[in-house]
Amino acid sequence: MSVPLHNGTASKIEPNAGASLQSSSDDGTSARVDVAPGTFPDGTTVTLGAVVDLDALVSQAPPPARASVILGFQVTATAEDGTALTRDFANPVTLEFTVPATALPAGARPEDLVVAFWNGASWVEVAGSVTTGAGGQLVFSVSTDHFTLFSVLHRPGASSTGVFAENLPRSGVALATWGGGTIQQAFTLRTPTGGRLVSIWTFVGGRPVGYAAASPDFANARFRALFPGDVIPAGTPLLLVIE
């Protein structure tokens, strides 16, 4: 698939360094890419650009029924020898998409919008977090281990699987309601400022039962036993430790 891009930006990975790129579209939507040191070989060039014509994008990459494309940004990485680096990165890369209130469909709710990537045949939703800014803008934060074309889709009545209903703080302890999904999905989430989950807790008979990302399997066994298949049902209140 080939779609025209504009407002492109690029960054070359220097030794022992990461990269941060930002781009925006004429309608005020924007994207940010944060690459941690060691994610790509030295000399890799990371690029980010906004899709010029969303209608052209939709004609080549149609969204699901009753869904519409709110924005489109393409992210690429190219090694010094010209090889395209598309997946299996050494570290997850954080992507952030901002949709101003003026670019939101009338009546759109945060839970009706999802980040998705194009896999060559269909749009695939990505678990992440969403926060609402003082000006009504929505900020979506996701992690990925591959680059392609990303969008935010408006899907009225869309599932809130893989997100928390509340805005997550940068760090500290927070009580939040899980939208449904796996334990692993929860630990892929990042706050817009880069915070990540250290542990999640529920309560059984008034006693805390937790799952910590850095703990061995036996230490997390009791928590996992509460949620068969590692699936935490939608609406489950969880205590979060974020750093």
Image (cartoon, rainbow, N blue to C red):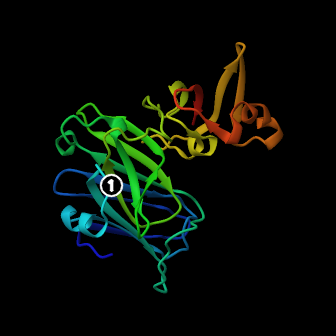
Q: Can residue 235 be seen in this view?
A: yes
Dot 1: what SS?
A: strand
The quarter of the rendered structure image containing the C terminus is: top right
Image check: 54 left or right of 237?
Answer: left
160 relative to 240, above or below: below
Q: Is residue 7 visible?
A: no
152 relative to 149, above or below: above
Image check: 236 left or right of 11?
Answer: right
Q: Residue furthest front?
A: 65
104 relative to 11, above or below: above
- Residue 227 is situated, as x and y percent measured from the top left of the image, at 68, 34
- Residue 153 is situated, as x and y percent measured from the top left of the image, at 32, 50
- Residue 99 is situated, as x and y percent measured from the top left of the image, at 27, 45
Q: Which residue lies furthest to the top in this view?
A: 206
Q: Residue at 72% of width from left, 30% of height from top?
A: 226
Q: Nearer the viewer, residue 173 or 13?
A: 173
The quarter of the rendered structure image containing the N terminus is: bottom left
Q: Mark 1 points at which residue?
A: 31
Image check: 120 left or right of 62?
Answer: right
Image check: 211 left or right of 239?
Answer: right
Q: Residue at 58% of width from left, 29% of height from top?
A: 240
85 relative to 119, above or below: below
Q: Which of 80 and 55 is in front in this view?
A: 55
Q: Residue at 57% of width from left, 45% of height from top?
A: 185
Q: Nearer the viewer, residue 240 or 33?
A: 240
Tell me which corner region of the image, top left, top right, bottom left or bottom right, holds residue 225.
Answer: top right
Q: Residue furthest bottom?
A: 81
Which residue type carries mark 1? Ala
Tell me which corner region of the image, top left, top right, bottom left or bottom right, holds residue 76.
Answer: bottom left
